[in-house]
Image: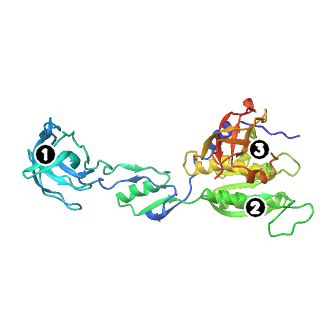
Amino acid sequence: MKRLNLISIEEAQERIDTQFIDYELETEELLLTECRGRILGEEIYSPINVPDYRRSTVDGYAVRTEDLEGASLDAPILLKLIGKSEMGHLTDLEVKPHETVYVPTGGMVPAGANAMIMQEYTEPKEDGVLFEISASELENMIDVGGDIMKDSLILRKGSLIRTQEIGAMASIGKKIVKVYKKPRVSIICTGDELISIDEDLTPGKIRDMNTITLKMIAEELGCIVVRNELVKDDFDAILKVVGDAVDESDLVVVSGGSSVGEKDVTADIFRTLEENSVFMHGIRVKPGKPTIVANIQGKPVFGLPGHPVSALNIFRIFVRRALDRIQLQKDSIPRMVRSSCQEGFVASPERDTYQMVRFTDDSMGHFVKVTGKSGMITLLTKADGYVLIRAHDNVVNTGDVFEVILFD
């Protein structure tokens, strides 16, 4: 009888981290305004200084710091006002000893000045401006290149493009951006008992849900699902579909046939496509123990359990990790809250358990275990998230506090 060679969660993560470091997605060019949420496919260097002039960060007065040494509320210092720096325009004014110039926020600090004093600490007089505080060099102003220096690297390849990254690229005039294409994912579900949602239900059959739910979660993670197929338990048929999927995709998921039963042929199919491709078959985790991961053509190819809860669980945790790695991303940061167990329970002493839980009130202050078998999709409809319970610490007591990972 075949047995699974179970490895720990941490070892599984490490193997996924190291197997696909050489795989790189194709790139495409987009308008800057279309890039939010995408992954940068090039290094971004600045062709200019930002700002390219000395800019005030306050409404106030440009001064020479040496002119205000010792200034205080009790001993203010008077400087001569020689003019105003207009917003959006160059100024040819120059601050000489014992002089000052008014500069609005964002305006150009004139030559000769090396600091700005907020107008709240000044008092206008007929013959100038009275200053009640001293200043330090470059106070309340940004020097040339103080934000971004010309020719400096401002964004690395592999950066997630958020609103702030778009702002940084806009500041240097970057209109067209090279980004990685969205990962192409194929989802193949196997099983003689499965029928599509469009077919009539007959005795011995069940409606497939994995092609739908796994497609939804892949799209939620920013992927393009290029294949989404239901295949009967026929070795040659599955081999053909998986082989075509590997050729067309960046990542492939096969749901079903990952265990060691008579019809569990997924691992053999992976090895037929590429010898020695399977580097993991079995994780010491519940649910999801018979998970397979292979490296075929340098691409991640997963064999997930057919049970819906197990399949979704492994997709969220391990397939998502592989997607992050081929996009040069660090681990996705899950949404989580600290919550305490309302009713104690005992988890598996043999495997780490991803335990589905639900909150007992709107405050998320307490949770209870959601019970049921891994083949029951209603487990997910009743759950708000899950907690990780280690096998060596499997007795959960009332009041124990956990980080609850929230479902997206």
Q: Dot 3: within a 10 Å radius of its alpha carbon, few (fewer than 14), some, or many (20 or more) residues?
A: many
Above or below, comparing residue 134 to residue 301 in the picture: above
* Nearer to the camera, 299 or 272: 299
**Residue 45 in the image: above or below residue 201:** above
Q: Secondary structure at mark 1?
A: strand
For disc 1, the marked residue is 130
Horizontal and vertical percent for residue 55?
Answer: 25, 52
Q: Is residue 299 shown left or right of residue 119? A: right
Q: Pick whichever of labels 3 and 2 is earlier in the sequence.
A: 2
Mark 2 Cα shell of 10 Å, populated few (<14), some (14-19), many (≥20): some
In space, the residues marked 1 and 3 are separated at their CA atoms by 73 Å
Q: Label 2, on which residue? A: 241
Residue that carries the numbered disc 3 in the rendered image: 287
Residue depicted at x 80% and y 45%: 371
> Nearer the observer, disc 3 or disc 2?
3
Determine the image quadrant of residue 193: bottom right
Q: Closer to the N terminus: mark 1 or mark 2?
A: 1
**Residue type of the residue flagged with mark 2:** Val
